[in-house]
Amino acid sequence: MAHNLDELIKHQPPMRLIDELCWAEPGKGHCQLTVSSDNLFYSERYQGLPAHVGIELMAQSIAAIAGYQHKAEGGEIKLGFLLGSRKYQCDVDSFKLGEQYDVFVEELHAESSGLSVFECDIRHCSEVVAKARLNVYQPPDESAFIEENYG
């Protein structure tokens, strides 16, 4: 069952790159996208999304499952930050126009401070074409965090 991303992540078009959350459970989930030419990162040169955009596809998938968890617990969606990636490996030059990709994410480690590590992969026709570990941060008090760091 697909879920409405408007209710799950703060990314809005044109910055939203994933199309739907297919399923989620605590700490893991599956999102999908079909590459279109109106995607913010679409490149004529690559006839799709350049390989490095895979990291953002993974990060937005993490945001979607986090949003799903917060909503399921009766809370609001929260702001999250991608801190970095480790071991990003992509076996394709690009995510091709018109093709569907599946993004799977699973939390490996979480701290009460809001820091988490996720194992992620992107699949095309059930074959893993990209994988990485992402470090993310979701501040416990997003207003205080923004004020302290950007205010």
Image (spheres, rainbow, N blue to C red):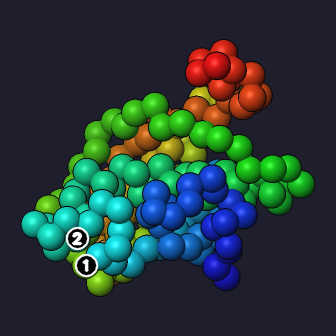
Q: Give the vertical position of 55 relative to 13 (above or below).
A: above
User: What residue do we see at 29% from left, 76% from top?
Assistant: 37
Disc 1 to disc 2: CB gap under 8 Å: yes
- Mark 1 residue crowding within 10 angstroms, few (<14) / some (14–19) / many (20+): some
The amino acid type found where label 2 is placed reads: Gly
Please provide percent x and percent y for residue 70: 78, 51
The label number, if any, that marks residue 97 in the structure image: 1
Please provide percent x and percent y for residue 82: 48, 37
Please provide percent x and percent y for residue 93: 14, 62
Which part of the image, by quadrant, shows the C terminus?
A: top right
User: What residue do we see at 66% from left, 25% from top?
Assistant: 146
Mark 2 — residue?
Answer: 48
Residue placed most toward the observer, 24 or 139: 139
Q: Is residue 123 left or right of residue 148?
A: left
Q: Is residue 65 left or right of residue 34?
A: right
User: What residue do we see at 56% from left, 60% from top?
Assistant: 12
Residue 139 visible from this viewpoint: yes
Indicate the quadrant where residue 24 lies: bottom right
Query: Hey, which residue is sitting farthest left in the picture?
Result: 45
Helix, strand or loop under label 2: strand
Please provide percent x and percent y for residue 136: 53, 36
- Mark 2 residue crowding within 10 angstroms, few (<14) / some (14–19) / many (20+): many
The amino acid type found where label 1 is placed reads: Leu
Residue placed most toward the observer, 113 or 9: 9
Indicate the quadrant where residue 127 lies: bottom left
Q: Give the vertical position of 51 relative to 20 (above or below).
A: above
Query: Hey, which residue is sitting farthest right in the picture?
Result: 74
Helix, strand or loop under label 1: loop
